């Protein structure tokens, strides 16, 4: 395992998740949550974020997809918080805007050790394939809670739920890459308090 690699395992009565994250290595992406549309979004985030991500996840999807989606967000958030602790000081702020056909997503991040989610998204279709779109808010809330970032997701317009969510995940990947970039230790943490 390289110095930049973070491995998280989480097993409960509802889900079983193993995740490997490497923010400094590009290209190793393998996502299998048993939810194909969710896999597609996570792959897009890692690809456009320029980081390696592998996820093997399963859960009680016979009951509902909620537990698996939420817990994947928790585990991914835990990995990013470990990166925050391990590699600080970081650039801290990240912002990216992505269009996809009819849709536009605007994502802004402050990796500041203060979790807060702003999520202004109105999906025109309730589902994409078999995936319930409302679950993405649950994913991002769980991700924010455990990564302890401030995440603002705003989509001013979009006619297609698939396009909206894909624009969000691509923009999120790019914003994460920007905010989690290491900076010189001489700069210290980018806070007037001196501590994040």
Image: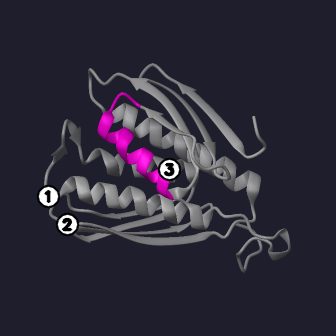
Q: Mark 3 and 2 residues: CB-CB less than 8 Å, in contact?
A: no
In the picture, measured across the screen, residue 61 lies left or right of residue 23, that is left
Quarter of the figure with residue 6: top right
Tag 1 residue? 124
Outermost residue to the front: 27
Tag 3 residue? 46
Q: Residue at x 40, y 39 (%)?
A: 70
Q: Mark 1 and 2 residues: CB-CB less than 8 Å, in contact?
A: yes
Q: Earlier in the sequence, mark 3 or mark 2?
A: 3
Tag 2 residue? 158
Quarter of the figure with residue 160: bottom left
Q: Residue at x 36, y 27 (%)?
A: 34
Q: Is residue 38 magenta?
A: yes
Q: Which residues are magenta?
A: 33-48
Asked if residue 141 is positioned above or below residue 10 in the image, the reply reads below
Estimate the x, y position of residue 142 in percent, counting from the top left: 45, 46
Asked if residue 163 is positioned above or below residue 4 in the image, the reply reads below
Front label number (1 vs 2):
2
Q: Residue at x 76, y 40 (%)?
A: 2
Cα–Cα gap, marks 1 and 3 = 25 Å
Q: Residue at x 80, y 72 (%)?
A: 188
Which image quarter is the C terminus in?
bottom right
Q: Secondary structure at mark 2?
A: loop
Neighbourhood count class around disc 1 (C-alpha, 10 Å): few under 14, some 14–19, many 20 upward: some
Label the magenta part by its dominant secondary structure: helix
Q: Earlier in the sequence, mark 1 or mark 3?
A: 3
Which image quarter is the N terminus in?
top right
């Amino acid at each position: 395992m390289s110095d930049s690699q973070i491995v998280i395992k989480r097993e409960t009565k509802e889900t079983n998740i193993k995740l490997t994250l490497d923010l400094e290595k590009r290209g190793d992406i393998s996502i299998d949550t048993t939810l194909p549309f969710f896999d597609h979004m996570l792959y897009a985030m890692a690809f456009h974020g320029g980081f390696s991500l592998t996820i093997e996840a399963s859960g009680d999807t016979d009951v509902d997809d909620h537990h698996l989606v939420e817990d994947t967000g928790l585990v991914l958030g835990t990995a990013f918080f470990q990166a925050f602790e391990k590699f600080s000081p970081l650039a801290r702020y990240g912002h990216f805007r992505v269009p996809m056909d009819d849709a536009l997503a605007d994502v802004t991040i402050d990796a500041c050790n203060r979790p807060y989610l702003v999520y202004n998204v109105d999906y025109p279709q309730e589902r994409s394939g078999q995936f319930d779109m409302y679950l993405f808010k649950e994913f991002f809330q769980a991700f924010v809670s455990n990564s302890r970032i401030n995440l603002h997701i705003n989509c001013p317009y979009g006619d297609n739920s698939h396009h909206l969510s894909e624009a969000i995940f691509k923009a999120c990947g790019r914003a994460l890459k920007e905010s989690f970039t290491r900076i010189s230790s001489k700069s210290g943490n980018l806070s007037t308090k001196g501590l994040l």
